[in-house]
Amino acid sequence: MKTELEQCLRLRFPEIYPYGLISHESGDDCIVYRLLRHFGQYCIGNLEERQTEEILIVMNELYHSKDLFCKNAIENEFLSVIAENLGTVDLMTHLNRIPATLQLTYIKVLLETLKDKKAVG
């Protein structure tokens, strides 16, 4: 699934795919995690863009692929980046941008993020 996820993101979003971030020759097992984090950060910086909406739709499709690795990676790297940065300010506005079938998962990740911040602070 790692290769499929990487290929999906590269083919669907070639204009924002971080080619310089990825080194296929290194046998790097963290490629998917770095990619998901990159796309999460892109979405944060471009909330109003159509591209962000498309990324969220693709992430929703990938999340519901029934692959446990993919689900965990999307929660831990993509959704957590968004939750950390957006927090609860304008939650309903942000939540409406996320596909309905991914909203509950996003809220779970947001609550975990808030809990972790409280424990650290």
Image (cartoon, rainbow, N blue to C red):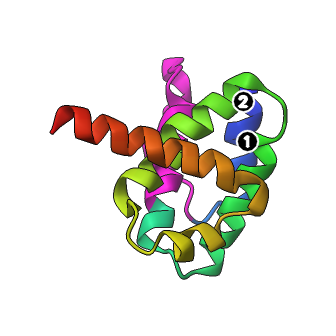
- The residue indicated by pointer 1 is 7
**Is residue 118 shown in magenta?**
no
Q: Where is 27 relative to 76, above or below? A: above
Report the residue that reaches farthest toward the left.
121
* Identity of the residue drawn at 76% across and 27% down: 1
Real-space Cα separation, disc 1 to disc 2, in angstroms? 6 Å
Residue 26 x, y percent position in the rendering: 48, 20
* Identity of the residue drawn at 73% across and 63% down: 99
Q: In this view, does 89 lie to the left or right of 104?
A: left
Classify the position of the C terminus by image quarter.
top left
Q: Is residue 120 left or right of residue 11?
A: left
Magenta span covers which residues?
16-41
- The residue indicated by pointer 2 is 3
Residue 93 x, y percent position in the rendering: 54, 77
In front of the other: 23 or 31: 31
Image quadrant where residue 53 sits: bottom right
Three-letter amino acid code at the position of disc 2: Thr
Q: Where is 59 relative to 74, above or below? A: below
Q: Main secondary structure of the magenta part?
A: helix
Q: From where the camera sits, is residue 11 visible?
A: no
Q: Which mark is residue 74?
A: none
In front of the other: 110 or 34: 110
Q: From where the camera sits, is residue 6 visible?
A: yes
Three-letter amino acid code at the position of disc 1: Gln
Disc 1 crowd rating (10 Å Cα; few below 14, some 14-19, many 20+) is few
Q: Is residue 74 left or right of residue 58?
A: left
Residue 6 x, y percent position in the rendering: 67, 39
In front of the other: 22 or 113: 113
* Identity of the residue drawn at 41% across and 70% down: 45
Disc 1 to disc 2: CB gap under 8 Å:
yes
Residue 109 x, y percent position in the rendering: 52, 42
